[in-house]
Image (cartoon, rainbow, N blue to C red):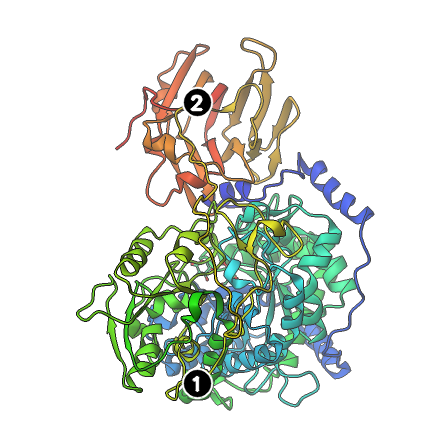
Amino acid sequence: MVFKKRMLLGVISALVVGGGLLGCADQAGDQAVGQQAESEHPSWPALTSGIAKDPAIESRIDALLAQMSVEEKVGQMIQVEIRTATPEEVREYHIGSILNGGGSFPDNNKHASVADWVALADRYYHASMDTSDGGVAIPMIWGTDAVHGHNNVIGATLFPHNIALGATHNPELMRKIGEVTAAEVSATGIDWVFAPTLAVTRDDRWGRSYESYSEDPEVVRDYAGELVEGLQGTPGSGDLLRGKYVVSTAKHFLADGGTENGIDRGDAMLSEQELMDIHAQGYFSAIESGVQTVMASFSSWNGKKMHGHKYLMTDVLKQQLGFDGFIIGDWAGHQFVNGCSNVSCPQSINAGLDMFMAPDPSWKELFANTVAQAKSGEISAERLNDAVRRILRVKLRAGLFDAGAPSERAYAGDESLIGAPEHRAIARQAVRESLVLLKNNDGLLPLARNQKVLVTGDGADNIGKQSGGWSVTWQGTGNQNADFPGATSVYGGIAEAVESAGGSVQLSTDGSFATKPDVAIVVFGEDPYAEMQGDVSNLRYQGEQDLALMQRLRAQGIPVVGLFITGRPLWVNPQLNASDAFAVIWQPGTEGAGVADVIFRDAQGNVQYDFTGKLTFSWPDDATPVVRNRGENEAQALFQYGYGLSYSDSVQMAALSEESGLQQAEGRESLAIFNGRALDPWHFQVVDAANHQSVISSSVTKLNGISVKSVDRNVQEDSRRLQWTGEGDATVGFFANSRTDLSRYAANGGALVFDVKIDRAPSDAVNIGINCGMDCGAEQAITEVLSGMTAGEWKTVAVDLQCLATDGVKMDMVLSPFYVRTAGALDMTVHNIHVAADAKADIHCG
Ligand code: BGC
Ligand code: BGC
């Protein structure tokens, strides 16, 4: 029997983020989406991988497959995480791959040495090669997120994030960055990196915007192949995929950057033509350069999860585009496919996923269920063998069968590669070329070195902040400068430039100074974030303190240079107005000295390096979340795609409007969620006890463990009767693909108010909840209130919003304002659901 377990928050989040507004009114509806796409599909190019099939490798695979048991095959298809699987377990389950997630290190030690990494790699390798229980020896492959250098390793060279690299418009540099990254990864005995990210970000509110080279496919396509060859080596060369080269991953397939409203893991609602013309372009050059793995995206296309998308994974990627490597899942992303759980998802494998990324401790159940499904034929022998063949093909191409233990490989353990001076020099060059000058009134820049310089702002001497997310830790937070040995802060670079030429530098984060400076450099901007935690609801940069600091310096007659650390274009008109010169320095990484290289003249007073960076993202003229891209709403860009001044331009910028364009919702009028129908932007949705996600439009719907029915209270169908059978957790509520700001309601004593009638009292806990995205939400028990009601009688219940506005809940970014969840039996009818201001609550908190 196949056991299914649920991951609660994940399930609800999945409903919110791309549960399928267009698709899946039910299973049939789900299929309808796929069919519609297929009947209209444009002609995808027929590509050839840069790495040709080798008949010798294929026959070696035939021989291996012939000897492998179903268990061994399934083991190859499961990737486990170093925190949740020991080498001993890798041996026992014939596991084919391991990863370390963001901020995951040997022995949980952030300061693990190169020797520690290699020793751990050796232990997993030996476990995978141990055939003492019988079976075939197949070396494991270790994957890591080296997304801007080998970013989980202390002392590594960290490059500027991709958004900055886009601005360099230098494909050749991408190849070098790939090579440096691969060399540092090889030093730790690791074989495979989850990079490059080929997202084409269309809505800059997305928390992963900085992982994207551009909003326009052109740069992404030009870079993808270079990066892949830099990481893997050039097809045809002797060192391909070995020596100082590693296996690379094109991610996240497909349209991770195209989700509605920039919601991480959301739904890309696009035509197939747009999918191909915008989001797939990077994959074309990556495949032609021989990329060996592709990571499936968490997101959906028109309501259907990519992890279950047979048409795109199998028909398009593998067949049409000729991709013959393997598809890896993303962080238990299979669990969000309709009908799946984190421990069971034959649907994903059948759709074309070849390897599950299974980072949580339940991977053994996933293993057992997948073995059972392969034995019962639910996963065909043909599909099983194809998946394993692809994995073995990549391992054989990478020479892993013959390379010996990681510690025996040529570069493993070579500490001198980590943060090597030649590597840092390339990163510093990337910093220089990525800086974009937006304002330079009166030619303030370039600065002379021999003057009194004040360096201020909280980004001035903060290597964690200047490195952004995916820097030692997953979110890039919680680091000190000491966690980046060998790195240079922006201040460090300035101090070195100025002091070496007889000038003087004062550093103060608050702008205070002992001696009045000739010029002040204010380094400020976004704090680090990664993935969904970086999603925002509008484009306002919220640094009130930085602005006051700039204005104060300006008022004292000190010229101000604003240096903006950011992972995306944000509305900074007030800061632009408060600066004489203003440059976007993005998230430059460990080589902050690249900034001083450009903003200062050399010691002789000549321009040493000019600004050459040009925007690959349109810059907004106000904070409203209008989608601004090359060729789309260009009139609403303050600076269009391609903008960037150099020292030969003499452009005087006049004062800009400081109207953000945002209107604060007052939160004083009641906000209806349901009044007989779900109000815009919400849809009435259910996740049933078998994790089928459905948008409910019909008047009666029966699902696993729950049925929902439109019923009459005052007028026809003005209420919904929700009947849970007690067969497992099921959730019903109102969900959207866009965000609603409830923060003012929370501040104004607001409450979530609904009328309810009970026909069968709850047999287990009942919670109502709100959700603001993946891992973002809160629930409040209403069991007692419901249990105390008289059967058949209506009651109005008001829950204080404070109960739901708990830590970590972004009340200004709500995706679901109301859902009900229980695993027990319950028969309840709801009517008139709304958010009220100043309501008298029955359930109080805080
Ligand atoms: C991991 C990351 C991962 C994230 C996904 C974190 O705990 O360390 O690598 O991307 O979870 O939610
Ligand atoms: C991210 C991927 C990453 C993986 C492993 C996921 O949450 O989406 O980009 O490769 O975690 O850390």
What amino acid is labelled 2 in the image? Ser
282 left or right of 153 in image:
right
Q: Nearer the viewer, residue 169 or 361?
A: 169
The residue closer to the viewer here, 609 or 750, is 609
Q: Are marks 2 and 1 in contact (CB under 8 Å)?
A: no
Where disc 2 sits, the SS reads loop
Q: Of circles 2 and 1, which is in front?
A: 1
In the figure, 491 relative to 412: above or below?
above
Q: Quadrant of residue 43?
A: bottom right
Q: Earlier in the sequence, mark 2 or mark 1?
A: 1
Q: Position of residue 708 (x, y in %)?
A: 58, 24
Residue 515 percent coordinates (x, y): 19, 71
Residue at 68%, 38% in the rendered image: 27
Distance from label 2 to label 1 (Cα)?
63 Å
Residue 529 position within the rendered picture, expressed as x and y whole percent measured from the top left: 41, 58
Is disc 2 surrounded by few (<14), some (14 to 19) or many (20+) residues within 10 Å?
Answer: some
> What mark, if any, has residue 606 been given in the picture?
1
Q: Which residue is mark 2?
A: 670
At horizontal 61% and vertical 82% (from top left) the residue drawn is 241
Decide if ligand 1 comes within 8 Å of the CB at mark 2.
Answer: no
